[in-house]
Image: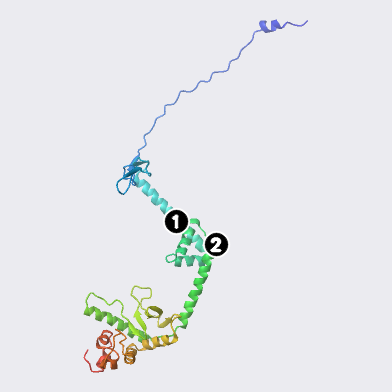
Amino acid sequence: MNDRLDDLVFGATTEVRTAPVLQRPAAQAYTTTSVEMFTEPCKKCRGTGKFVGRNGQVFGQCFTCKGKGKFQFKTSPETRAANRAADAARTATKAMQAWTDFAAHNVQIAEWIEANKHSFDFAAKMHDSVVRFGDLTEGQRAACQRLADREAVKVAERVQRIQQAPQVDTAGIDRLKLAFDKARAYAAAKAPGLALRNPKITIGGMTISPAKADSKNAGALYVKQAGTYLGKISDGKFMAVRECSESQRQQVLKFVANPAEAAKVYGQETGICCVCNATLKSKWRLRGIGPVCAEKMGWAGLAEDFGVDV
């Protein structure tokens, strides 16, 4: 016989299980701590929060502070200044290291950039590129190499020109420099406080004058023709440029060998004083130089030989 299901359903005892109820923990009490804020006025609008034109007309709110007229920071001005200084120091150190690494692997290019960055805008930009990016592009590197090679050729030519430059009478150079010094002293004595800036001698259309004491060629003598540079006398040699002709070279060398005698001969032949370019008349044409210029340059003997009191 089949058992009835009613007995199984209604007669049997059934056990009902219920899931445990989870209890949410009590909310924690959170505390807030106030943060000290540092308030500074906007420097752009001077704390007004307005954009004011030169004529005093207000055009709207300040673009920098958005009309607030102030800024708030969590750190003091001193701390922010110290942080900026530290950042700048780190940037400088990084830049120095970048240049050092580049120079170690690109000696010729780095030397060319260093030598020209203060006078050549392109070299300055290449230096900034290395400092910023640590290297140059292929095109930049090639351009720098061409310029460095060109500079090397010029240096070699300059060295060769110096080596081949004719030797100048050293004693004559010293006498000429002494004459220029005497001319300065003479001018200072005649007009105290008013120094003679550029004493010079003119011979054959060429002027010979000393370089300034603060120039890179201090101690040298410049030779020019109507303002055109023909060369310089330095270290016992006359280093002439291409524009200087052979006859001009010989004239300079002859003059420097014995300046006083050459000045006298020049004045006698041309009737022109080589110091002041004035026309020499009568007896002074025979001496080749006037009494004032002779005394000024320390060549008073040229006039004394003629029996004139200078």
Q: Tag 2: Cα neighbours inside 10 Å, few (<14), some, or many (≥20)? A: few
Question: Percent from the top left, x then y, of residue 42?
Answer: 34, 44
Residue 222 sits above or below residue 269 on the image: above
Residue 158 lies left or right of residue 35; in this view the side is right
Residue 193 picture location, percent across and down:
23, 74
Q: Quadrant of the C terminus?
A: bottom left
Q: Residue at x 25, y 79 (%)?
A: 187
Q: Residue furthest right?
A: 1
* Label number found at residue 139: 2
Nearer to me, 159 or 195 = 195
Asked if marks 2 and 1 touch (Cβ < 8 Å), the reply is no
Q: Position of residue 130 (x, y in %)?
A: 49, 59
Q: Nearer the viewer, residue 35 or 192?
A: 192
Does any portion of residue 10 appear in the rendered image?
Answer: yes
Residue 244 numbered tag: none
The residue under label 1 is 93
Quadrant of the rendered structure where residue 235 is? bottom left
- Which one is closest to the eye, mark 2 or mark 1? 2
Q: Is residue 129 above or below residue 272?
A: above
* Quadrant of res 190: bottom left
Q: Amino acid at mark 2?
A: Gly
* SS class, disc 1: helix
Residue 105 in view: no
Whichever of callouts 2 and 1 sits on the residue coming sooner in the sequence is 1
**Dot 1: few (<14), some (14–19), or many (≥20) neighbours within 10 Å?**
few
Q: CA distance from mark 2 to mark 1?
A: 27 Å
**200 vs 78: above or below:** below
**Residue occupying the point 48% across, 56% down:** 132
Q: Amino acid at mark 1?
A: Thr
Residue drawn 37% across and 49% down?
82
Q: Quadrant of the N terminus?
A: top right
Element at label 2 = helix
